[in-house]
Amino acid sequence: MAIRMPHILRRASSLKANQAASAAVDVPKGHFAVYVGESEKKRFVIPISYLNQPSFQDLLSQSEEEFGFDHPMGGLTIPCSEDIFIDLTFRLGGS
């Protein structure tokens, strides 16, 4: 005799799978997501090419010093103000 899962439970589990998939899909190929901010974190999607830039590598070093490789947000977190990050990415986008 098989145990049947109620319809509402199947929908909830497939909804969670769809949400996880959509979170990965909203980052286009060649980009990655970072969380920026000193208190409240905001998510930004930026080009992978920024990883080669010395100024962005400095931010990554600061992030490693502050958070190490095990951060509770589960993603790459940049410990600087949102304004500084936006200014940096604007300058990197123009180069």
Image (spheres, rainbow, N blue to C red):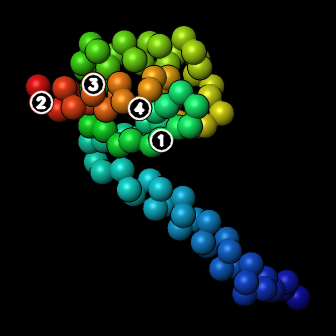
In contact (CB < 8 Å): disc 4 and disc 1 = yes
* Distance CA(mark 4)–CA(mark 1): 8 Å
Q: Name the quadrant containing residue 94.
A: top left
Question: Are there few (<14), some (14-19), or many (20+) residues within 10 Å of tag 3?
Answer: few
**In-image side of 77 versus 92 (left or right):** right
Task: Tell me the amino acid under the disc marked 3.
Answer: Leu
**In-image side of 9 versus 39 (left or right):** right
**Front residue of 50 and 85:** 85
Task: Tell me the amino acid under the disc marked 4.
Answer: Glu
Vertical order, 33 against 76 (above or below): below
In contact (CB < 8 Å): disc 4 and disc 3 = no
The residue wearing badge 2 is 94
Say which mark, if any, is on residue 88.
3
**In-image side of 67 versus 24 (left or right):** right
Q: Name the quadrant containing residue 10.
A: bottom right
* Distance CA(mark 1)–CA(mark 3): 15 Å
Say which mark, if any, is on residue 42.
1
* Distance CA(mark 4)–CA(mark 2): 18 Å
**Front residue of 76 and 81:** 81
Whichever of labels 2 and 3 marks the residue nearer the N terminus, that label is: 3
**Front residue of 2 and 42:** 42
* Residue drawn 46% across the image and 62% down it: 22
Q: For the N terminus, which image quadrant?
A: bottom right
Q: In what element is the residue under mark 4?
A: helix
Say which mark, if any, is on residue 58.
none
* Residue drawn 17% across the image and 32% down it: 93
